[in-house]
Image (cartoon, rainbow, N blue to C red):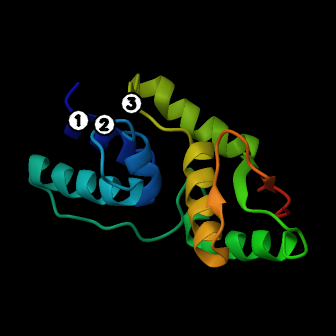
Amino acid sequence: MEITEQVTKVLAYGEICDHCLGRFFGKRSHGLANDERGRGLRIAQALGTNTPYKSFAGTCWVCGNFFTSVSIWADRVVEAVKDIEFSTLLVGCRVPPLIAENEEMVWSDLSLADPEPFKSEVNREVGKAVSAKIGKVVDFKKPDVVIILDLANEKV
């Protein structure tokens, strides 16, 4: 199945943000953020099918527009670690079951070979935002602090 056909099928599920659309093809190519990849795929699909381009507007059925709140999550993390002395950090998260089910359904239905899990993008994007806000470095091997985001309960 060609990529434009796969994108068309993903878009048929309902409103989907550029982050989630791009993440379904997240291991293809390098040097693009998932939202950039998603926007590019949306454009390529419109061009390939000669249909009007439609940018994302609404609520993403996969993530519920989680990625609009990355800075809010980063602020929560900053507040949670303000009294801790550390140099390195790592962000992890607990993914709500519905989000995991949504993305796994698409992976399975369309036999997608190159998706990136929601969890990976959340950890990376919130980690980058926290690092930028407080000037600490992300360390995947031996972090001084591990921060767990409880997305369902909106807690750090």
Instruction: Check if mark 2's residue and mark 1's residue have beta carbons within 8 Å.
Output: yes
Instruction: Point out residue 116 in the picture as x, y percentages from the top left corner.
Output: 48, 38
Question: Disc 3 marks which amino acid?
Answer: Asp
Residue 91 bears which disc, if any?
none
Residue drawn at 38 percent across, 24 percent down: 113
| 3 and 2 marks in contact (CB < 8 Å) | yes
Marks 3/1: CA distance?
11 Å
Q: Do residues under tags 3 and 1 come within 8 Å of each other at their CB atoms?
A: no
Q: Image quarter for residue 43?
A: bottom left
* The C terminus: image quadrant: bottom right
- The residue wearing badge 2 is 28
Residue 103: image x %, image y %?
Answer: 55, 38
**Residue type at mark 1?**
Ile
For image coordinates 63% across by 44% down, the residue present is 119
Q: Position of residue 34 (x, y in %)?
A: 40, 53
Q: Which residue is mark 1?
A: 3
Identified at 70% across, 51% down, the residue is: 90
Q: In the rendered view, tell whether residue 66 sits above or below residue 101.
A: below
